Structure formats: C-alpha cells, structure tokens
Amino acid sequence: MNFDDVFNAQNTSGISPEKLAFLKAMSARQAGGNAKDMMAALMAASSSAQKQGIAFNEAERDMMLELLLKGLSPEESKKARGMIQMMKKMKK
C-alpha cells in the first residue's frame, strides 16, 4: 500500500506530524490480508497509539480505517465494514 497516494487523496492539513508519522508506520505494517487480520491490526494500532499518548478524532479514525481497508479485497473489505458498523452500534 502506498502511503503517499492514500494521504494525497485525503485532507491531512489539520493532522499533527506525530499522528501522520504514526499512520505512515501503521500503513507500512498492514499489507493486505483479510477482515480478521485488519481488525487485529486496528486493535494493535489503537493500543499502540494509546500507549504513545496519541488520540485520534472521529475523522482521523475514519481515515485510519480507510487506510486499512485499502489493503483488502472487495469481499474482505465488505466483511470488515460490516464488523466496523456493528462495533459502532455497540458503542452507542
């Protein structure tokens, strides 16, 4: 996955350099896989960010999800999106 292509397509002007560096490192570790692997990567990234004192707002989390979803096949992306929606509903 090419980090620069993904972020050139996103509005990253309001994101701190620390957060962008974190997202770039995360994107380098995520290379395809399936929905289950993507969710595990997301959980690991969330834990790592928390340990580093990095907090993402909703728009930044959505960008992170899109970054992770880009490495999945269309079928696996659909599964992952379903899991994400279910998790969001559970939080409400």
Image: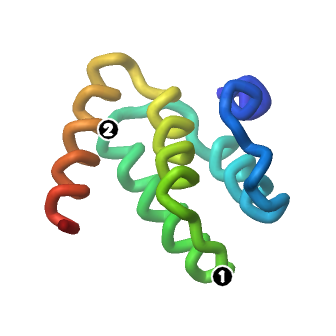
77 or 18: nearer the viewer: 18
- Identify the residue at image location x=54%, y=63%: 57
Asked if residue 69 lies left or right of residue 25, the reply is left
Display coloring: rainbow
Q: As displayed, is residue 4 above or below residue 27?
A: above
Residue occupied by mark 1 = 53
Q: Can you give x and y, in whole percent of width and height, for residue 35 in the image?
A: 32, 38
The quadrant where residue 82 appears:
top left
Locate residue 10: give its quadrant: top right
Please state if 6 lies on the left or on the right of 39 as rendered.
Answer: right
Which circle, 2 or 1, is nearer the viewer?
1
Residue type at mark 2 is Ala
The residue that mark 2 highlights is 35
- Residue visible at 68% across and 51% down? 23
Marks 2/1: CA distance?
Answer: 27 Å
Residue 27 pos. (x, y %): 65, 43
Reply above or below: 12 against 6.
Answer: below
